[in-house]
Image (tube, helix red, strand yellow):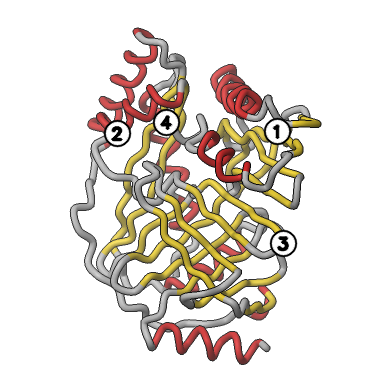
Amino acid sequence: MDNLFLEKLKSAVQNRIPFVLFRRPTGKEVELYIHQNAGNFRFLMHSFDAKTEKYISTANRLTMAVSEFDFDKKLELHPAENIRIITQSAYEKQIKNAIKTIQETNIRKLVFSRIKPIKNKGFSPFKSFANLLTQHPNALVYLWHNPGEETWIGATPELLLHQNENQIETVSLAGTKLPEAEWTLKELDEQKFVTDFILDNIKSLRNIKITEPETIQAGKFQHLKTYISAEIEDLTQTKSLLESLHPTPAVCGLPKNAAFDFIIENEGYDRGFYTGYLGIETPKNREYFVNLRNAQWHNDFIAIYVGGGITADSNPTKEWEETELKSGTIINALV
């Protein structure tokens, strides 16, 4: 099976067929989907602005033990176009404007982001993917390659929605700090915003359960995480739930519509699939993850997407520093 996995992956690269490699959080297997026109296994990418959704589907899911994954091949990539490089002073100016808006309007939180470009000095997407597998065992780690269009890599710690028959699960994940720091009111408020938002959107469901917030580790960072579960009456509710939950306050802000409009008008670039969501759809269940800690791979640059939550108590310089630290998820995996 392992030889077949590598043979099929090599063939997909050589024949320019879209594929995705991924490992579920805490999983022990790398899964490979190579695109076919018809298949009951799907891996989808949904953009932040909900204008774009692409998927790779297959009827023949292949797996390999994470410990045995060893592959390297050059991918056909295109030069980066129109990467918006923003200076620290310009980004801090954006954050100050966001804080002013929060103070003067009913917007309570905004999530601002930017691209940190790294020169591609011949880095290997496959070996960097393997590093992410090791460095982030509790994340969904993926490498998506759509020849002629885009190549993305990432390690996201955030579940958006898991549906297994009539049972759904989600998490409220927000707030970011280094292990040596203490939680402040800013992070506690950020996490409460997300929790309240989710509960408001699932209040019509049955048997809602919620845990107390706990501190979890994601790479070098710690976040606050609350587990939430409920029951749906109809499996078709999954799509409407996704539409109501995305984008969450953790990647957009509150109120959602006002924050979204402000971001589109003021952030200054197209996020693409960053802070959209990833979906793994199988005959038995569906899992969707917020697309964080990721990068788009080009032959000349690797565009790393980073951002953070802004509230009335935010400090613009610290927000820049937080994005610099978050870029380490990808930078530390490059090889």
**Foreground pick, 281 / 291:** 281
Q: CA distance from mark 2 to mark 3?
A: 36 Å
Query: Dot 1 corresponds to which residue?
Result: 226
Q: Are marks 3 and 1 in contact (CB under 8 Å)?
A: no
Above or below — where is 132 with respect to 115? below
How many C-alpha atoms fall within 10 Å of the one at disc 4: few (<14), some, or many (≥20)? Answer: many
Tell me which numbered mark, 1 or 4, is placed earlier along the sequence: 4
Q: Earlier in the sequence, mark 3 or mark 1?
A: 1
Q: Please tell me which of labels 1 and 2 falls first in the chain.
A: 1
- The numbered mark, 4 or 2, whose residue comes first in the sequence reads 4
Label 1 neighbour load within 10 Å: few <14, some 14-19, many 20+: many
Q: Is residue 159 above or below residue 134?
A: above
Quarter occupied by the N terminus: bottom right
Q: Which mark is residue 264?
A: 2
The residue sitting at 38% across, 14% down in the picture is: 102
Q: Which mark is residue 284?
A: 3
Regarding mark 3 in the picture, which secondary structure is present there?
A: loop
Residue at image point 60% right, 69% down: 40
What is the total number of numbered labels drawn onto the structure image?
4
Amino acid type of the residue tagged 2 in the rendering: Ile
Q: Tell me whether circle 4 and circle 2 mark residues in contact (CB < 8 Å).
A: no
Q: CA distance from mark 1 to mark 2?
A: 29 Å
Q: Which mark is residue 111?
A: 4
